[in-house]
Image (cartoon, rainbow, N blue to C red):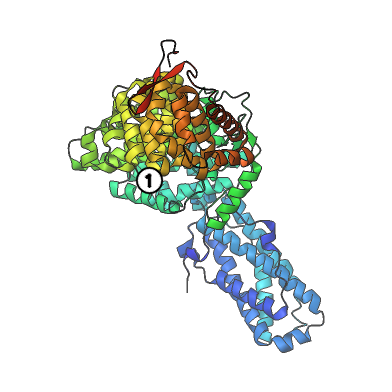
Amino acid sequence: MAISPQIFPPRKRRPSAESFISPKLNDINLLHSLLHLTTQISSINPSTTLFLLKRSTTAVVRKAKLLAVLFEDLIRNSDTALASSSSSSSFLLCLEETYIVLHRIKTLIEDCSNGSKFFLLLQIETVADNFHKLTGELSTLLDIFPVHDLDLNDDVQELVILIRKHCSQSKPVIEYSETELRNEVVSVLERIKNEIVPDRSRLASIFERLEIRDSSSCRAEIESLEDEIQNRNDENSKSEIVALIGLVRYAKCVLFGASTAAAASFVVEAQRRKQPTELVVPADFRCPISLELMRDPVVVATGQTYDRESIKLWMDSGHNTCPKTGQTLAHTELIPNRALRNMIALWCREQRIPFDAETVTGRPSSRVTNKAALEATRMTALFLVNKLKVPVTNSQSMEDSNGVVYELRFLAKTDSDSRASIAEAGAIPLLVRYLSFDVGVHSPSLQVNAVTTILNLSILEANKTRIMETDGALNGVAEVLRSGATWEAKANAAATVFSLSGVSAYRKRLGRKTRVVNGLVQLARCGPEGPRRDALAAILSLAADRESVAKLVEGGAVEMAVEVMAAVPEEAATVLEAVIKRGGLVAVAAAYNGIKRLGAVLREGSERARESAAATLVTMCRKGGSEVVGELAAIPGVERVIWEIMAVGSVRGRRKAATLLRILRRWAAGLDGGEIEGFSTTTMTSATMVVPTSNSIAQ
């Protein structure tokens, strides 16, 4: 009975050489293992599980069926057969080598069944030769198989001779139709490379013959090709695969149309299920910029740790400061935090989360591409954008638009070439149409896909300018931020603000927009954890500009940070530190009621949260005068907590704690009455309010 391809689940990596080491078993157990292996191979029906190399696969499956008869007979007569062998050690060695060859045959069939169809087609001569070589190795083993030393009946002996004869006469077999199809694919890739749009009917014929007949099978083929890149070390092979991915992406859109809204939603939901969203990632394992699990943690000049990709993007955007502390970086060298990386890798293994454990060299990996891939990407982007130019008139056309926008969202996520091609094709003004409140009401998924596509496009530096210069783009993002139909839409709008604010000039423009600031503050105040973190990250980025800080204070960012400190202490304390540092007296006054909460973070927060809380309190005490210091001193046990941070905190945390302790001691001794950094205290009824003196420096 034929078995489905699922009996050999696909692998993300090819097996190492150790996978083919023979098992250390005694004679009878090894025979049982061989029988099980040959039964697995002989159960495959190449006509249903393969579309290429059927003759080669059928030949080895037939030989496996005959070998299964041999192993069954040896097991059945094991006592007499094994006892009659005059050289049991050589017989056992022969069985072990046979096991290795059969295991390699099974693995080769597995690759053909579950791997990329396009890549198998281009490698068909090599794969056919591999089948031939393995059959030759099997023939050699059967030549030394001690047939006459074993107590086998005549039929089985004749069977071994027959298998040996078939193996010795085997040749690499490739059908003419397979060679013709391979040449057809190469020809199409060459035409794309020369900027010639492939003929639709020609594409349809190729994909039909490869049995790729719908969008889902195209997605599966793209995933297989992407996995294949991980299996290859040679750059030429990788370049070939990248070109094939571009071809399949283009054909998917042209032949099978963009995803329907239902299909797009299904894929997004499936991707979410793959992610460990229900797991709580330890705070120390999350990047302070992206708030995602770090894959390659690095340390910057200030001693803070970030994910390499996030901090590299931050620096490439023109920043020369540490995102978390606001300090100017003495140098831009990124030092791998190998100890933390090993801890993250261990945690991921325990949680069964995929984690790339390959050695990080510290050098950016070169992106593999070629002319055919670039042109295929450009053609795909142009095709999709042209479909978006049709006016939206009813719910059906809105659903069609949703499918197209989803395809653009997916394409924009892949690489910088795709982002450039989409923007150059004129997608951004068309995407802005779908950010409105009305679209969110009638098609929430379309709004989500549109704002997420803009977010993905904004990763490319040149696209930041395109987005900021597109009429209505900034207002559209602000609209989604304030009144988006879903939390996902609002979160991605906040992430877009964060991405765009990487450019100093744009940070100023964003910070001056009241709708943007109010939207971020409201999302951080009321949103669930994920969107709240996105909003706080955007606020922190805007706080790097002194003019923007005034708008943040006016918009209630300080009060918001105090309110959410119990839920997200690390992020809230960091935002509070950044805003108060540049916000002057008004910010200090707004944060006055949060001093006790900062004290709680000092006592119970993570190392990073305690560091930010200590830094915030130092700034507040210096700017706010005796009233603020007195409020801090009134917290029970605060000095003990400060001593603890001085003993076990981070380098910056210990420094800030020491400063805080000196301020408290001077206040207790009555040495800091009057003015502190240009501010004085004035008593009004029962409360003391901090107000600027005439000599105060403008903040």
Q: Secondary structure at mark 1?
A: helix
Q: Residues within 10 Å of mark 1 (few under 14, many from 20)?
A: some
Q: As rendered, which of 330 and 342 lies closer to the eye?
A: 330
In the rendered structure, the answer to whether residue 418 lies left or right of residue 345 reads left
Percent coordinates x, y for residue 555 in the rendering: 32, 27
Which residue is drawn at the image coordinates 29% and 46% (left, top)? Answer: 260
Q: Is residue 694 above or below residue 165?
A: above
Which residue is drawn at the image coordinates 45% and 17% (left, top)? Answer: 679
Percent coordinates x, y for residue 62 in the rendering: 57, 71
Q: As rendered, which of 380 and 561 lies closer to the eye?
A: 561
Q: Is residue 414 above or below residue 137?
A: above
Q: Quadrant of residue 236?
A: top right
| Residue farthest left in this picture | 394
Q: Is residue 199 visible?
A: no
Residue type at tag 1: Ala
For the image shown, how many numbered marks are present on the structure? 1
In the rendered structure, the answer to whether residue 214 lies left or right of residue 79 reads left
Percent coordinates x, y for residue 197 in the rendering: 40, 33
| Residue farthest top in this picture | 695
Residue labelled with disc 1:
204
Q: As rendered, which of 470 and 555 lies closer to the eye?
A: 555
Q: Quadrant of residue 440?
A: top left
Percent coordinates x, y for residue 100 in the rendering: 68, 66
From the image, which quarter does the C terminus lie in?
A: top left
Which residue is drawn at the image coordinates 58% and 46% (left, top)? Answer: 230
In the rendered structure, the answer to whether residue 216 lies left or right of residue 72 reads left
Q: Is residue 167 visible?
A: yes
| Residue farthest bottom in this picture | 80
| Residue farthest right in this picture | 86
